[in-house]
Amino acid sequence: MGLSLRGLFLHPVRGRFSMSQMRVRFAPSPTGYLHAGGARTALFNWLLAKHSGGRFILRIEDTDRKRSTAEFLDAILEDHKWLGLVWDEGPEIGGTLGPYYQSERADTYAPFIQKLLDEGSAYRCFCSPEELDDRRSRTSQNGRDWKYDRKCAALTKEQSAERKAEGRSSVVRFRIPDGKTRFEDMVLGPVEVDHQELDDLVIARSDGTPTYNFVVVVDDSQMRITHVVRGSDHLSNTPKQILIARALGTEPPEFGHLPLVFGPDKQVLSKRRGAVAIGEYRRRGYLPEALVNYMALLGWSCGREQEFFSLDELVAEFDIAKVSRKAAAFDPEKLVWMNAQWIKRLPLPERTARVVPFLAAAGLISNTPDDRQLAELERIVSLIDDRLKTLADIVEHASFFLADNVTFDNIAVDKVLTKSDSVDILNDLCGVLSHAPDFEPATIEDLTRKLAAVWGVGVGKVIQPARVAVTGRTVSPGFFETLSLLGRDKVLARLKFASELAATLTTE
RNA sequence: GGCGCCAUCGUCUAGUGGUUAGGACGCCGGCCUCUCAAGCCGGUAACACGGGUUCGAUCCCCGUUGGCGCUACCA
């Protein structure tokens, strides 16, 4: 009873022009991971709210108990936090207009269904799915322009009650009135829909549970949502929801429909089609800053030629009216570029800290390095400079610094160490460096260049075999700095090892 | 099929009733250079088509085509 009373309280006048702050929600269902499409919707909602100093509400639409899982829920919450889209009301923190899990709101809907039934805005429909199928297939060749024929709409309340008493199962349908619905979409502008195109939708299933289009209206009203921003795949639901809201005596929120996001294959991003989960980007070494920046630019632009935006800058600049009406394709290559740009902009200590989990996962360092290790790591990261496209790239760039032994790249070995003079070059360099007065980059450079002069070749001829010897690869940060940081002992040992290896490979 | 949304370089986009149609990613070339990146310089590439309106349309209108979405007792 208490629940019903609370449930019956809707907000008849929202007051578009009142001083009350904007209340915006994102309502994911935990039936899959958050992907770039959903995350962009969340981001735009969040930005809309924050730009106006309003509140961002997270509501979990977990009524599909079969497909909803705790794992998906956790991932979604974690992704929001990681992206910086903190919510003002919702899971974990609650709020005054909860519960924020739809599954916990199950008892609030029945009184509203009853209200519509009592007032004649809805009616019971006793047509079975089989009958419906039958009539549907007879109405049109392909059965695709079928609309519910309102067979049960004409039933009087007495007839309806009688059938119900007989125990016949029924659904509740919303009675679409004559006329047109128009609304001003925040993204699309004016939208008008003739009710001829709508049919009497089911708002309560035969088991009594309410359907999506009904639940959303009640939830949004009870949570005092003022603005709904969602994918344009919901556009056709909007007039139905507006009509239901009005029948319930509450003012519908403002709506904004975002164009869909395609994958590079021009197919709409979706869970079913295996869109990349946000958590996957995190694991692959993308920065949340880059992802947010990239997603914001997917369908929105500030009008100037600025392309880098922090979350704070986005909050300040975001204008939903400037969102494009055209669907946009997600370009992974541009994301990579943007990620590299954001990594470059990270101050060294920060960049170093962010790289730690990736090195730890590769077993190259401890998850909790001490100050000395961190200082060394910082020198390595500094040397690698802006070669990282993702944080995960740190492993391939830094492993030869951190691992005890060099892992040789076969192609590098084939290409460089098999050259006939590589053994002698490596031995000579080893000899020269073992007598170096110090192991500063300048000293190493000087000695290396002199050796190259003795051989009568360019420095590159000396450096390349030595690079492979010391790093196992043909590419690395600056050679002299790399050797210096690695230290004389390791360098000499590796040169020696490689020269022996090369000796076994050189056929002449 | 019906209804709806959309249409500028391959991709993300800016833009105006008169512009050499701008930027970014990618790609190509060059510079730098010990390799690879980064950086810098240069290049490649677009107003879907057809009718109107207009002195003049990429821009406004209509149509065509194309892409996409919706069309459930899913959300």
Image: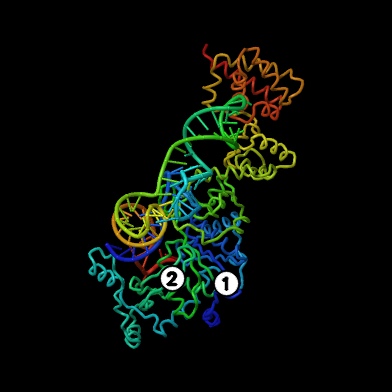
Q: Chain of mark 1?
A: A
Residue A243 picture location, percent across and down: 42, 75
Question: How far apart, in angstroms, are the residues tagged by discs 1 and 2?
Answer: 19 Å
Total numbered badges shown on the rendered structure:
2
**Residue at 54% in and 23% down:** A413
**Residue at 76% in and 23% down:** A438
Dot 1 and dot 2 within a common chain: yes
Please state which amino acid type lies under the numbered disc 1: Gly
Q: Chain of mark 2?
A: A
Nearer-the-camera pick, B33 or A272:
B33
Nearer-the-camera pick, A183 or A134:
A183
Nearer-the-camera pick, A386 or A26:
A386
Please state which amino acid type lies under the numbered disc 2: Asn
Work out which residue is located at the far right of the displayed protein and give it: A437
- In the picture provided, is A213 more to the left or to the right than A197? right
Nearer-the-camera pick, A424 or A504:
A424
- In the picture provided, is A136 more to the left or to the right than A268? left
Residue annotated with mark 1: A98
> Which image quadrant for residue A303?
bottom right
Q: In what element is the residue under mark 1?
A: loop
Q: How is the image coloured?
A: rainbow
> Which image quadrant for residue A351?
top right
Residue annotated with mark 2: A213
- In the picture provided, is A72 more to the left or to the right than A400? left
Instruction: Report if residue A472 is visible in the image.
Output: no
Residue A429 picture location, percent across and down: 66, 17
Which of the numbered marks, if any, corresponds to residue A81? none
Q: In what element is the residue under mark 2?
A: helix
Residue A277 picture location, percent across and down: 50, 52
> Sequence order check: which comes first, mark 1 or mark 2?
1
> Which image quadrant for residue A238?
bottom left
